[in-house]
Image (cartoon, rainbow, N blue to C red):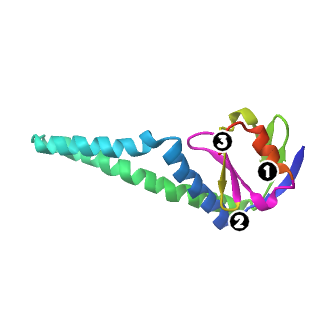
Amino acid sequence: MYSFDARYDEEGASRAERTFFIRSARELRPWSTFGPPVVLSVVVAVGSAFGAPGWFLLMFGAFLIASVFLPLFFYFARSAAAAKLARKYPVRHIGLSEDGFTVRVGEQDAVVSWGRVRHVWASPGYTLLVLGKFACVSVPVASLPPGAQEFIKKAVRNVA
């Protein structure tokens, strides 16, 4: 139905990835993102209050620190990877059909059915096709041909 070349810029792709990461952490995986720091804080506090051995406090303290810093690391690492990919492949060919969409990056094609797209989210300058808790396909809004945005929204059931 639609076939077009999408033009990606480093800053926009990075910003879209950060938007996805924050929103997916809040809406798709809040317990797995915010639960471990809370639970581990309680474990360390209770262990400290009851005089737990040093190895116990050290081990759970290290887990607590990791549970806070790993999401921060991935926040920056994912946006840097998106910028690097936009720098390496600034133009990607995208095809939209009744069955799904195709993204061509270099010599590689990725074909995704609309049934795998869980949500359509907006990001400044980008439309995010959310495939899961950790994956999305970003499409620059400026590259979309007339009517493609509406086509995507009709093809996907959960539009937010």
Residue 98: name its quadrant: top right
> Residue furthest toward the right?
1
Going from the N terminus, do you reach mark 1 or mark 2 first? Answer: 2
The residue labelled by disc 2 is 9
In percent of width and height, residue 155 lies at 78, 38
**Which numbered circle lies on residue 128?**
none
Q: Which residue is mark 1?
A: 149
Residue at image point 78% right, 62% down: 142
Which picture quadrant has residue 151? Answer: top right
Residue 91 in the image: state x and y as whole percent: 79, 60
Report the amino acid beneath label 2. Asp
**Residue 136 at x, y = what percent?**
64, 46
Magenta-colored stretch includes residue 153: no
Q: CA distance from mark 1 to mark 3?
A: 13 Å
Q: Residue at x 33, y 46 (%)?
A: 37
Callout 3: 10 Å neighbours few (<14), some, many (20+)? some
Crowding at mark 2 (Cα within 10 Å: few <14, some 14-19, many 20+) = some
Q: Is residue 137 left or right of residue 37?
A: right
Q: Which residue is mark 3?
A: 119
Q: Residue at 49% of width from left, 47% of height from top?
A: 26
Circles 1 and 3, Cβ within 8 Å, touching? The answer is no
| Amino acid type, mark 1 | Gln
Which of the pair 105/135 is nearer the observer?
135
Residue range highlighted in magenta:
126-146
Mark with earlier residue (2, 3): 2
Q: CA distance from mark 2 to mark 3?
A: 23 Å
Question: Does residue 55 show up?
Answer: no
Mark 1 residue crowding within 10 angstroms, few (<14) / some (14–19) / many (20+): few
